[in-house]
Each structure stands twice: as C-alpha cells, then as structure tokens.
Amino acid sequence: MLSNLSITLLKLFSERTTLSLKDLGAIYNMDPETFCESIAYLRRCNYLEILPTYVMLHNDDFTLDAPFRITYEGKSALEENLKTGRQNKFNELRAWMTLAIAILAFILSIFNLYLQYR
C-alpha cells in the first residue's frame, strides 16, 4: 500500500513530464533531501525512473539534479489507488444510507406504536 506522500508524488509526476529532487523541494518549499526516501521507494517499486539520457551521462546517479519520470507501472499503481479510493467512498456512502434508512424505519415503527395505543 502506498503512503500519502507516495501517492501525492505520483500524482505530481503524472501531471508533469520530469521532476528532480530540487524541483520537488522548490514546489513544496522544503529541503529536497526530505523526498529521498520516498523517491527511492518509488524507484524500487519501478514506479519512477531516471531519464535514460541522464543515466547514460551520469551512470544512474541518484542526485538532487537527476530528472525522474513516472513509469507505466507508476501510472497503473496511481490509477488503481484512485479506483480503490472511489470504491471505498461509494461503500461508505452506501453504509451510511443503509443506517439512515434503518433509523428512520425504527422511528416510524415507534411512532406507529404510539398512535396505535393512544
């Protein structure tokens, strides 16, 4: 399961072509090294990759300037996460509606008993 930061980063990478750690630091106004662990995790999962042209020139260095992009697997994981979130919201709404109907039926049955014995 992806963390909230990982999901946020994948969404950001899906909106933009490439981003480096320095870019992330500038966007969020944070130290770029804050994102190192999350980016490393997303790379291990094959959700992000360093641009092949940068890899050829710098030997797959994980630096602050390395440009990352989302992979097909990353887009799939993001879409699956969004689909799961929508399904969970739908199930929660359905559960609350069922509870509301049950409470309303209970109140109406009590009201009917009151009118019957009055």
Image (cartoon, rainbow, N blue to C red):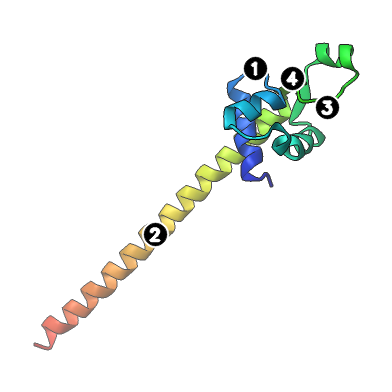
Q: CA distance from mark 1 to mark 2?
A: 40 Å
Which of the two discs, 3 and 1, sits closer to the camera?
3
Place of residue 74 in the rendered image (x, y in percent of width and height, measured from the top left):
70, 30
Q: Quick one: 62 or 109, which is closer to the camera?
A: 62
Against 99, is 17 above or below? above
State the residue at coordinates (50%, 43%): 86
Place of residue 105 in the rendered image (x, y in percent of width and height, measured from the top left):
27, 70
Mark 4: amino acid: Pro
Could you say whether the residue bearing mark 3 is in a helix, strand or loop? loop
Q: Are marks 3 and 1 in contact (CB under 8 Å)?
A: no
Q: CA distance from mark 4 to mark 2?
A: 45 Å
* Residue 8 in the figure: left or right of residue 96: right
* Badge 3 or badge 2: first in the primary sequence: 3
Which of the two discs, 4 and 2, sits closer to the camera?
4
Q: Which mark is residue 98?
A: none
Against 29, is 103 above or below? below
**Location of mark 3 (residue):** 62
Mark 1: amino acid: Thr
State the residue at coordinates (69%, 25%): 22
Which of the two discs, 1 and 4, sits closer to the camera?
4
The residue sitting at the right extreme is 59
Could you say whether the residue bearing mark 1 is in a helix, strand or loop? loop
Q: Are marks 4 and 3 in contact (CB under 8 Å)?
A: no
**Location of mark 1 (residue):** 17
Which of the two discs, 3 and 2, sits closer to the camera?
3
Q: Residues within 10 Å of mark 1 (few under 14, many from 20)?
A: few
Q: CA distance from mark 1 to mark 4?
A: 9 Å
**Quarter of the image where one finds residue 60:** top right
**Location of mark 2 (residue):** 96
* Badge 1 or badge 4: first in the primary sequence: 1
Q: Which mark is residue 67?
A: 4
**Quarter of the image where one finds residue 109:** bottom left
